[in-house]
């Protein structure tokens, strides 16, 4: 089972002082997370002003420097909130060369075109599935067999409902014949219950300050490496 470290996401140091934003901070955190047990990294590159960026020069520089530091695969986001125009997102990712993989949210306009552009550039695709509707769309897309993994992600569900939500998503993926490896994770209150459920299912999972600022016991996490270590203690990445 793979344990991926999700270093920053849309969070900033305003949310938590240890959120890495600069390439130096990202590289430092990636090294610490690998030492704690992570075997892959997911991050959101930022330009010198601190804004999330999909620009090839920014993305490639950040990924190269982080991967050189930590020695494991490094992936990025293609989130539509960064560049709302689907056609422009396609144009930008066509210029990427460094990422090992990138996440593409099935719910976002133009996701198929973005995914195909990544594949054409030799970059792996993690398809983000948030709902049963997303799972249906992926199953009928014809793209599932070309993916690096499917991200089963519960982003806005209370802890008590999270497992039933992923149960329904997995059922649709299974019925649709999607056999691509899956990485399951949640955010906020659902983070740890879904990580433990992923361990139970024998699935890849992830953790980091992108998803939660708290340890399993509800106390504030010191940094990304402490969250990774806590996930390892629960059996993730074993």
Image (cartoon, rainbow, N blue to C red):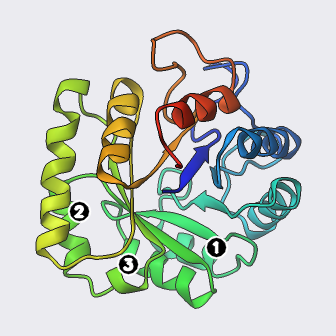
Q: Which mark is residue 134?
A: 2
- Mark 1 or mark 2, which is nearer to you? 2
Residue shown at 45% from the left, 12% from the top:
217
Q: Position of residue 172 (x, y in %)?
A: 13, 65
Tag 1 residue: 92
In front here: 127 or 48? 127
Name which quarter of the figure residue 73 lies in: bottom right
The correct choice, above or below, for 12 with respect to 136 in the image is: above
Residue shown at 40% from the left, 34% from the top:
187
Indicate left or right for 202 with 34 as reference.
left
Q: Do the residues labelled 3 and 1 touch (CB within 8 Å)?
A: no
Q: Which of marks 1 and 2 is nearer the N terminus?
A: 1
- Mark 3 or mark 2, which is nearer to you? 2
Q: Are marks 1 and 2 in contact (CB under 8 Å)?
A: no
* Label 3: few (<14), some (14–19) or many (≥20) C-alpha neighbours in 10 Å: many
The correct choice, above or below, for 26 with respect to 57 in the image is: above
Q: Earlier in the sequence, mark 3 or mark 2?
A: 3
Q: Position of residue 72 (x, y in %)?
A: 73, 61
* Label 1: few (<14), some (14–19) or many (≥20) C-alpha neighbours in 10 Å: many
Residue shown at 66% from the left, 26% from the top:
226
Q: Which mark is residue 112?
A: 3
Residue shown at 60% from the left, 78% from the top:
91
Q: Distance between the residues labelled 3 and 1?
A: 15 Å
Indicate left or right for 180 with 51 as reference.
left
Q: Position of residue 227 (x, y in %)?
A: 59, 29
Q: Which of marks 3 and 1 is nearer the N terminus?
A: 1
Q: What element carries label 1?
A: helix
């Amino acid at each position: 089972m793979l344990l991926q470290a999700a270093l920053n996401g849309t969070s900033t140091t305003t949310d938590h002082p240890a959120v890495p934003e600069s390439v130096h901070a990202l590289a430092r955190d990636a090294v610490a997370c690998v030492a704690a047990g992570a075997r892959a990294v997911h991050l959101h590159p930022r330009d010198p002003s601190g804004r999330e960026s999909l620009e090839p020069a920014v993305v490639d520089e950040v990924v190269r420097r982080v991967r050189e530091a930590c020695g494991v695969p490094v992936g990025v986001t293609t989130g539509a909130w960064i560049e709302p125009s689907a056609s422009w997102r396609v144009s930008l990712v066509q210029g990427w060369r460094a990422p090992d993989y990138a996440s593409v949210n099935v719910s976002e306009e133009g996701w198929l075109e973005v995914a195909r552009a990544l594949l054409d550039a030799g970059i792996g695709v993690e398809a983000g599935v948030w709902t049963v509707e997303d799972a249906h769309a992926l199953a009928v897309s014809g793209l599932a067999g070309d993916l690096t993994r499917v991200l089963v992600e519960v982003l806005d569900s209370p802890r008590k409902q999270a497992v039933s939500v992923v149960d329904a998503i997995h059922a649709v993926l299974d019925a649709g014949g999607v056999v691509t490896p899956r990485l399951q994770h949640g955010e906020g209150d659902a983070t740890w219950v879904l990580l433990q459920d992923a361990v139970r299912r024998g699935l890849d999972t992830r953790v980091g300050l992108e998803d939660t600022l708290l340890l399993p016991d509800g106390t504030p996490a010191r940094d990304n490496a402490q969250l990774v270590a806590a996930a390892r203690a629960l059996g993730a990445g074993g």
